Amino acid sequence: MASIELDIWRGEWGLASIDLECLKVLTYMKFIGVPVKVREVSNPFFTPKGTLPVVRDGRKVLTNFEEVVDYLKTLHYSTDLHLNTKQAAEASAFTQYLKDKLYPAYQYCWWVDEKNYGDLTRPTYAKALQLPFNFYYPSRYQNAAKDMIEALFGEHADLREIERTAFLEAEKCLKTLSDRLGESEYFFGNRPTSFDAVVFAYLAPLVKAPFPNPTLANHVKAINNLSRFVARISQKNFRNVTDEYNKQNAKKKSAGTQSESEIANFPNQTRNKILAALFAAIAMTGFAVANGMFQDMKEFQHSQDYSEMFENEEDN
Amino acid sequence: MLKEYANKILDFLINVICAATRKCMKLMVNYNCHPLIPHQRRYTQEPWPDNVKLFQPYEVEQILLPDNASCLAVQAFLKMCNLPFEVEMRWNAEFMSPSGRVPFIKCGAFVVPELESIAQFAANKGVTLTSKLSSEERAEMRAYMSLITNVLVNAELYISWLDQETFNAVTKVRNSSVYPWPLGWIQTRSKRAAVVKRLKALHWHDKTLDQVLADVEQCCNSLSQRLGDKEFFFGTPTELDALVFGHVFTIITTRLPCRRLADTVSKCTSLVSLAKRIDERYFKRP
């Protein structure tokens, strides 16, 4: 049973993983308590679909949340056994509802919004990826998200219109979720289900990640019972991750944050400096060669007359 | 390789021609319409006018499975609300619609497309079917409507446009029947490309027919479990019943070369009897 391996994107800001699908699978596994080896992978090149998460159990390879839930059910690990058929139907309907209304807004917020993508998403994924791939994968994911947004909201020509419509739908969806949760601990009674894992995976990044353009994040934070839901699950299931993040935060605050944040924003400062110096050196050498200065230098070495060299320079 | 390039160039030319055609068709609309602007709330306080028209493509020769389902759902909704309307069939209905999708209603100076917006529009005028529902039930209703939009609509699009048999025998013929020859071929090609793009973005393009039908079966099971043996989903007829009626009735009564979708849906007897009940009550002439 300990042969189940899970490869996920690394975590940040007190989250176990920055990616939605990874967080869904990880939260579900934490709910069930199945023994699993979690690995933070920095290279999705060798995965079947080029995305994470990937769950491996012996020969079996699974890549999305629904497959993982079904597979764990066959191993008799499931949180949904206490749901009757009506609740199970409701859970599947609500999952589709989230996918229909909240997922487009989530993708827009992460990938399509220029400010968020440039300042938050791309640096985070670049940090998580190895060198050659951090140019390729973030833009690939961005293109996929842009295609989806265009397919769903194609009739609006203006990006701001799309943002407005998507966020309006998401707001309604969040309000509906909040109404459904009410004051109870989880969505279906007081035991967590796969649906709770899905909702947590959507909401936690929105609550915890520091978006430059925080419209959607503010909507979520404004809803009290949803924020409490996220905090509660974080506390119960991801305590070591949140504690580590809080410790790091406290250290940063005492050690001076400026250099840390700069290094976080520009992870390759040394590399950039060396490349710049090399480029400048090559450019200057090329210019010198083009102007025939090395010829002059050679002649100067042979000639003993200092003033002769200056005469030649003036001629040029 | 050469074939790929040829296809790409062809698609680009077709896109240009279609954009031009669409512009011409928009000019051929024979009256002035303004799409509903949200801040013009004072206009929506007027009561429902008498000359509301519902626009859809021609029912006998042109309309396709997904559009037929949406149109029937909207008609059922309006009948449930007791709002009078007339059905007008136009060959260019989808181009006249502000969102590009049918059906749409023309209500005074406003043009409102698709069931959700029409339900909102009616609610602004004080006509709603969900007044007796609690907020939780309304949340559930919206969730189930999303389920149908995500699963049944995409399945219908898949069967109509991606299943080769159905596409060649039914969709191509019906879609191009209202245009003169070269335009019909171009229009169908461009519409198919748009549908393929949409299904690819929603990850439905790579599914096999069996996977699509499995999703449909799961969706129908969820719906029939929620319905149980009640008369309607929430006691009184709501837009969810109208939507379920529109899709289920269309799927079981449309004759396609591929019978499997109709068979999958007919297995859920409670949904079929709901559809028949709504048909009896609202669509049969006395």
Image: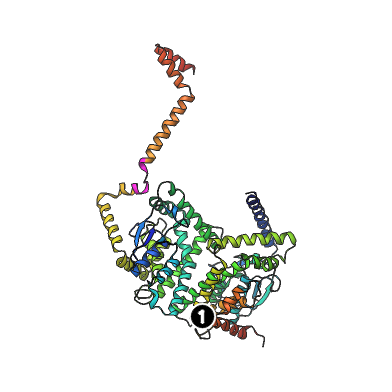
Residue A265 colored magenta?
yes
Image point (71%, 71%), residue name = B61
Q: Is residue A177 left or right of residue B103?
A: left
Q: Tell me the SS state at disc 1.
A: helix
Residue B72 colored magenta?
no
Q: Residue furthest left?
A: A254
Let me know if residue B228 appears in the view. Answer: yes
Q: Position of residue A30 (x, y in %)?
A: 34, 67
* The C terminus of chain B, quarter of image: bottom right
Q: Which residue is mark 1?
A: B224
Let me know if residue B130 appears in the view. Answer: no
Q: Residue furthest top?
A: A305
The residue nearer to you, when weighing B13 against A34, is A34
In the figure, B130 relative to B23: above or below? below
Q: Amino acid at mark 1?
A: Ser
Which region is colored magenta? A262-270
Image point (40%, 15%), residue name = A301
The residue nearer to you, when weighing B45 against A203, is A203
User: Residue under mark 1: which chain is it in?
Assistant: B
Q: Is residue A207 left or right of residue B245?
A: left
Q: Residues within 10 Å of mark 1 (few under 14, many from 20)?
A: many
Q: Position of residue A307 (x, y in %)?
A: 41, 12
Q: Quadrant of residue A75?
A: bottom left
The residue nearer to you, when weighing A53 against A118, is A53
Main secondary structure along the magenta-highlighted residues: helix
